[in-house]
Amino acid sequence: MGDFRLGPGEVVRADLTAPLRTLTYPALELFALTGAFWIGIGWIDAGHLALDVHQRNLVVLCWMLVACWRFLLPLLRSRRQRFIVTNQRILVRAPKLRAPLDSIALRDVRGASRKRRGISLALVGYQRPLYFPDVPKAKKTVALIEESRPAWPSVQEW
């Protein structure tokens, strides 16, 4: 919560980040890449290939770079994703390294629903709802948003 400040009288009701299941594929990919690279390094160490120590170290460096690119970068991205519900607004940050924190006032939310492990928000001024994928505890979060937002007058009262 270091990059935003709460307003006066504002209370955080839910602070969520991406679920760990978003890292399943990158972790499996890391295991496969590590196995393939280190089998190759074992071949180099056994003397099956005529390579010197510097070339072996280059292969280890390539493994490290690929491991960072295919696992560490997705890990950092997913941990940066945030979905925060306060008593006055919803704060959302996309799963990117330098994504800004967007704020949606609860008074602008017409409705919230859960779709495919994500949350869909109908907002005033938007024809289509905004969809936020991979929000953990989506059902509870939708219920929290629905009870937190102010009631809109019915069409007959306009």
Image: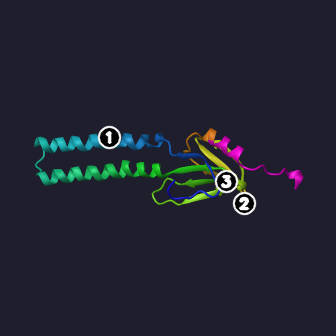
Quadrant that contains the C terminus = bottom right
Q: Is residue 3 magenta?
A: no
Q: Nearest the camera: 53 or 80? A: 80
Q: What numbered label is drawn on residue 88?
A: 3
Of badges 2 and 1, nearer the viewer stands 2
The earlier-in-sequence mark between 3 and 2 is: 3
Q: Which residue is mark 2?
A: 125
Q: CA distance from mark 2 to mark 1?
A: 47 Å
Q: CA distance from mark 3 to mark 1?
A: 46 Å
Contact between labelled residues 2 and 3, with CB atoms less than 8 Å apart: no
Q: Is residue 154 magenta?
A: yes
Of badges 3 and 2, nearer the viewer stands 3
Magenta segment boundaries in residue numbering:
141-158
Give the structural element (helix, strand or loop) at label 3: loop
Residue 127: % across, % down = 72, 57
Residue 97: % across, % down = 45, 57
Q: Amino acid at mark 1?
A: Ala
Q: Amino acid at mark 3?
A: Gln
Contact between labelled residues 1 and 3, with CB atoms less than 8 Å apart: no
Give the structural element (helix, strand or loop) at label 2: loop
Magenta residues, dominant SS class: helix
Q: What numbered label is drawn on residue 32?
A: 1
